Amino acid sequence: MKTIIVPIDFSEESLNALEYASTWANKYKSKRVQMVYVQTKKASRYGISEKKEREEADKQLKALVAKYADKFHKDCEFTYIIKNGRVFEEVAEQAEAFDDSMIICTTHGESGWSNFFIGSNTYRIVEGTIRPVLSIGTKGAHQKPKTIVMPLDITKETREKVPLVASIAKKFNAEVHILKVTSST
């Protein structure tokens, strides 16, 4: 988890994800945290041109860098990127650009003309990447994990996640509850 990707839409919820990313980056001594803002065609519905939206996003992202930079350890590079397209595709693609990355995002978010963090985008991000995705709700976003619930079935894909969960539990001194998932006719 040397790179942490945080989708940002400037909502309070996405800023909570950024706060949470600082906890993880400091615990894992991450090399970088990168905010990702995705321009969508929705801004034009509110009479805002793509150029104006990009300028405003750039201005707000620079302000976030100035405000949050001291929350990260001294060797952590804190940056941002502005992309165009579908939020879930662009966020997943950005995470894939780094060898050892994870995504920390929120399950909800909405701000003015950028209304894109409805749960479906978070779900699509999870579906669209092989990278670990930590999705947080609106409550308790600043807390360190104390309890981890890990659903486990007999598939290879879920068993492969056991070492990662164990690593996270060890780093945060968290308790792990394994939930056995079965299906039956």
Image: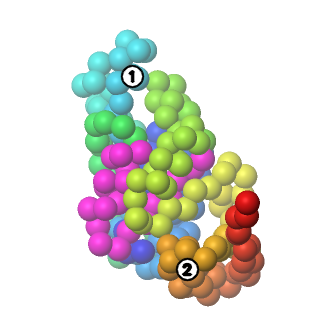
Is residue 155 in view from this perspective?
yes
Residue 59: within the magenta? no
The disc labelled 2 sits on which kind of residue? Answer: Arg
- The residue carrying mark 1 is 43
* Residue occupying image coordinates x 57% and y 37%: 118
* Residue occupying image coordinates x 53% and y 49%: 123
- Range covered by the magenta-colored residues: 88-107
Q: Earlier in the sequence, mark 1 or mark 2?
A: 1
* In the image, residue 22 above or below residue 116: below
Instruction: Identify the mark at residue 159; answer none if there is no mark.
Output: 2
Q: Position of residue 154 (x, y in %)?
A: 60, 77
Q: CA distance from mark 1 to mark 2?
A: 42 Å
Is residue 76 in view from this perspective?
no
In what element is the residue under mark 2?
Answer: helix
Residue furthest to the top: 47
Q: Position of residue 55 (x, y in %)?
A: 29, 31
Determine which quarter of the picture holds residue 1: bottom left
Determine which quarter of the picture holds residue 135: bottom right
Front of the two marks 1 and 2:
2
